[in-house]
Image (cartoon, rainbow, N blue to C red):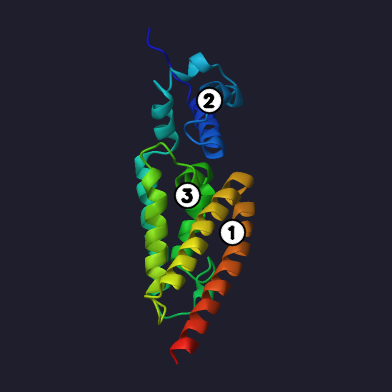
Amino acid sequence: MAQVLKEELRARILRAAGSEFAARGFAAARLADIARQAGTTASNLYKYAPDKEALFLQAVPPQLAARHMKLLRARLAGFEQGEAWTSLTAEGSGAAAALLAFWASHRHAVAILLSNAQGTRYEPLRERMIVEMTTRALQRFPHGGDPALAFVLRRILSGTLDTISAILREYERPEDIRKAIRHFWRFQLAGLQALLVEGSREKG
């Protein structure tokens, strides 16, 4: 008789897997810990995934990673436009609001994609995000070819991914995630705007 898989248990396993992979990374995450957090046994996990990699890809499916990149690029398009960067919050930008909603709905998966995908097919995504963020930002600066500015922006935006990932690991409720990220965005965007204003003065 075929094994009947329980959707409620599957959901618990995927939540536990996302939590463990986000906290420990793929290599260090243990199936026994995932099973314990899900309230089942390690042997029972194999009814839902044949191995750790298959379980990881259920927790962070390729279509979710692709959707995240699409939303991030839509948000980054605002970096190139003429309005002040301080307006690119969830309240001032539809693209920012959509990205924030996605983060709140898929917190563990996004935390993994941003800063803890080492040893998985998604490992190159972090570097791609940093490069795209830096490139888009530099297009607004009068001295966009300045290597020192490029270095500083890259470090700032690398830290952005780490901070957002930490928020998504720390907070569970969507309203808490949104509140923390709004705080961070106000700080970050004001700093980027100040850099932009200073760059314009130097050009003048």
Residue 174 percent location from the top left of the image: 59, 50
Residue 35 percent location from the top left of the image: 55, 22
Q: Which mark is residue 114?
A: 3
Secondary structure found at label 2 = loop
Image-based side of 23 in relation to 57, left or right: right
Secondary structure found at label 3 = helix
Are the residues at dot 1 and dot 2 in contact (C-beta closer than 8 Å)? no
Indicate which disc, 1 or 2, sits on the residue closer to the N terminus.
2
Q: Residue at x 54, y 75 (%)?
A: 86
Q: Is 184 located above or below residue 40 in the figure? A: below
Q: Which residue is mark 2?
A: 30
Amino acid type indicated by mark 2: Arg
Real-space Cα separation, disc 1 to disc 2, in angstroms = 30 Å
Secondary structure found at label 1 = helix
Q: Is 48 located above or below residue 115 in the figure? A: above
Q: Which mark is residue 6?
A: none
For this orientation, the residue located farthest to the front is 148
Q: Which mark is residue 181?
A: 1
Q: Quadrant of the N terminus?
A: top left
Amino acid type indicated by mark 1: Ile
